[in-house]
Image (cartoon, helix red, strand yellow):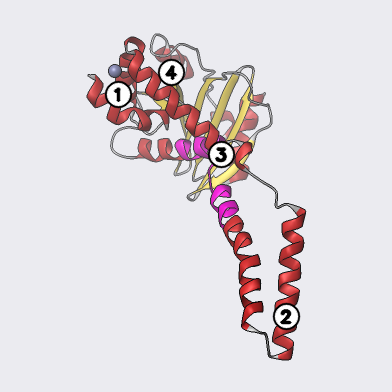
Amino acid sequence: MACPKTKDLIEAYGDGELDLGSSLEIERHLAGCEACAAVLERHRALRSALAGASLHYDVPPRLAARVRSAVRKEAKGRATGWLPSWRWAAVAASVAPLAILTWALVALSKTPSPGDLLNQEIVSAHLRSLMGNHLMDFPSSDQHTVKPAFAGRIDFSPDVRGLSGVGFTLIGGRLDYLDGRPVAALVYGRRKHVINLFIWPSAGGEGARGVETSLRGYNLLRWSRAGMLYSAVSDLNAPELRELRKAFEE
Ligand SMILES: [Zn+2]
């Protein structure tokens, strides 16, 4: 892939929105192209700056006091049914900065955090896997077949477990791409539900505290253990998904 084309795709790559094939091509290009690597670096810096806490401000106490007094004055004016037009102008002038600030705070609070972005990425990867024939690169119910299948395709060895004893049937494994890197996906089935369990090495810094959430109708669990990050996603209910996590933590 040549520069003009990668330049178009680099931001999508930085946001983890590309499919595995394109991501790998971009990575190959980045390894040899300083200009494109710099574009990616700038995009990542911007992304983390937007998600950072430094853009969030508390309302200064003086502004809060001004708003309270403006509202009091307005209420008084309403009560008497009369307010000189110049006072309305004063009320409007003192409330306007708050309106702008409120708008800014609402806009900023909607800026997704890196964790939110990862959750979205995980659900998207799950949905992609359910489309067409993308669910498995190597179908097998045998962990001793699935585990070696990852060897040579990714730079780590995922913990692959047969969990039929606790009611999860291993269906197979797949390579996927999350959080800016290739990851292992283990596919389990329970009744009619498909569960994707993504595994990849922790880059450090992630706490052991897990994340449990639901997004677009899918339940999602994330946790870390022994230097690896795990993420299970499915339309299976949360308590049963926790059983899968428990089985992996034993
Ligand atoms: Zn380039």
Q: Earlier in the sequence, mark 1 or mark 4?
A: 1
Q: Are marks 1 and 4 in contact (CB under 8 Å)?
A: no
Q: How far, Cα to Cα, is label 1 from label 3?
A: 26 Å
* Disc nearest the viewer among 2 and 3: 2
Q: Are marks 1 and 3 in contact (CB under 8 Å)?
A: no
Query: Which residue lies under the disc numbered 1?
Result: 21
* Disc nearest the viewer among 1 and 3: 3
Q: Are marks 4 and 3 in contact (CB under 8 Å)?
A: no
Q: Which mark is residue 75?
A: 2
Q: Is residue 208 magenta?
A: no
Q: How far, Cα to Cα, is label 1 from label 4?
A: 21 Å
Q: Is residue 107 magenta?
A: yes
Mark 4 residue element: helix
Query: Which residue lies under the disc numbered 3?
Result: 113
The structure residue drawn at horizontal position 47% and vertical position 28%, both measured from the top left corner, is: 44
Q: Which residues are magenta?
A: 103-122
Q: How far, Cα to Cα, is label 4 from label 3?
A: 34 Å
Please, what is the three-letter code of the amino acid marked with disc 2?
A: Ala
* Disc nearest the viewer among 1 and 4: 1
> Given the current orientation, which residue lies at the most extreme front position?
86
Query: Which residue lies under the disc numbered 4?
Result: 146
